[in-house]
Amino acid sequence: MERIKVAVNGFGTIGKRVASAVSLQDDMELIGVTKTRPNYEAQVAVLKGFPLYVPEGNQKAFEDAGIKVAGNIDDMISKADIVVDCTPGDFGEFYRDKYRAAGVKAIFQGGEDHSLTGVSFNSTANYSESWGAPLSRVVSCNTTGLLRTLAPIDRKYRIKDAYVTIVRRAADPGDSKAGPINGLEPSVKLPTHHGPDVQSIMPWLNISTMAIKASTTLMHVHTVVAHLEGQPTTEDIIDIMSKSPRVRLIDSREGIKSTAQIMELAKDLSRDRADMYEICVWRDGVKVVGDTLYYYQAVHQESDVIPENIDCIRSMCKMEQDPEKSVRKTNASLGISNN
Ligand code: NAD
């Protein structure tokens, strides 16, 4: 089978992980990554053997820094079947027009609006909607987390409404610019964009969200309250979660009381970059009272969207029609166990 040629534009927090994940797939070939500046991440890309492409005119700066360049970004785009765009939010329109002009498919990330692509992606909730699409968008880390748990519950016990508070990490661990470094900062523009973002995939879901930025870099934590049409027991909900893809039940009685221990677990599992791709739900924090479901979940913002990007490539490039088979294949490559 000929492998699909995948390029990754933007080699930051998400891009470097997508590139590593693509390089592990036997049905994909990583044909290049991009950097705008000759920094340590550019050196790492070359060290890993990833062909490095840079903006037109920047080649000399890279060569002066001793970093071998394979060409400019347009050269890379022209060689690809699909580009995974991992540039910071708001470059979307500029690059979408470039990809379109080159006749290349493209996946954008959650920093861009749904309207940029018209289709958004989550492996659990709507794998098939991106089938053959020229453009799609893997929703943000928080939205991915909410869809992974809410979609399977909604399928079985229709959710009447859901109220979510997101305690957001202030910055990624490698980012020393952002804050707050000591404090809690509520998002005062309400409701926050997370609810509408979930609705870009589950438009029928009545969901309201608020968010608070906290001085931590490790993970986000969600508190979820949902009213259900069905009348499941707590055990019924735990059963659904235990069978949902890329959802990991953790337990405070086993010592996982906070995001600190979840990150320690990811290290102990010898994951690449100590990533926790699964959404972690506290088993002993799931509770149903009457028609009201309560639970807490933790989201590793740097990595939960990585397996979704791989599945999205398979859907858009018509490589695997069965969502479950793609999820299993991606999981096997990244060391995620199947529920
Ligand atoms: P980042 O800042 O870590 O990386 C962005 C990369 O793009 C950098 O390497 C930067 O040099 C490069 N870049 C900047 N301008 C460019 C340009 N004009 N052309 C090509 N490359 C350019 O950002 P990130 O955190 O990886 O975020 C990327 C996308 O993923 C955003 O849409 C973001 O919202 C989304 N996302 C981020 C997270 C997260 O927690 N970091 C989680 C999920 C989704």
Image (cartoon, rainbow, N blue to C red):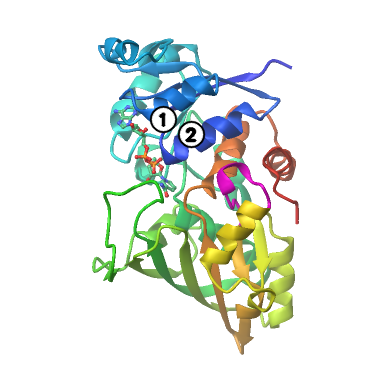
In this rendered view, identify the residue nearer to me: 164 or 12.
Answer: 12
Bin the neighbour count of mark 2 within 10 Å (Cα to Cα): few under 14, some 14-19, many 20 and up.
many
Q: Quadrant of the N terminus?
A: top right
Say what secondary structure mark 1 lies in: helix
Assess mark 2: CB under 8 A from ligand 1?
yes
Quick check: is 272 in the magenta stretch? yes
* Image quadrant, ligand 1: top left
- Which disc number belongs to residue 16? 2
Q: Quadrant of residue 191?
A: bottom left
Estimate the x, y position of residue 133 in percent, counting from the top left. 52, 31
Q: Are marks 1 and 2 in contact (CB under 8 Å)?
A: yes
Quick check: is 243 in the magenta stretch? no
Estimate the x, y position of residue 254 in percent, counting from the top left. 69, 74
Bin the neighbour count of mark 1 within 10 Å (Cα to Cα): few under 14, some 14-19, many 20 and up.
some
Mark 1 vs mark 2: which is more N-terminal?
2
Estimate the x, y position of residue 318 in percent, counting from the top left. 64, 28
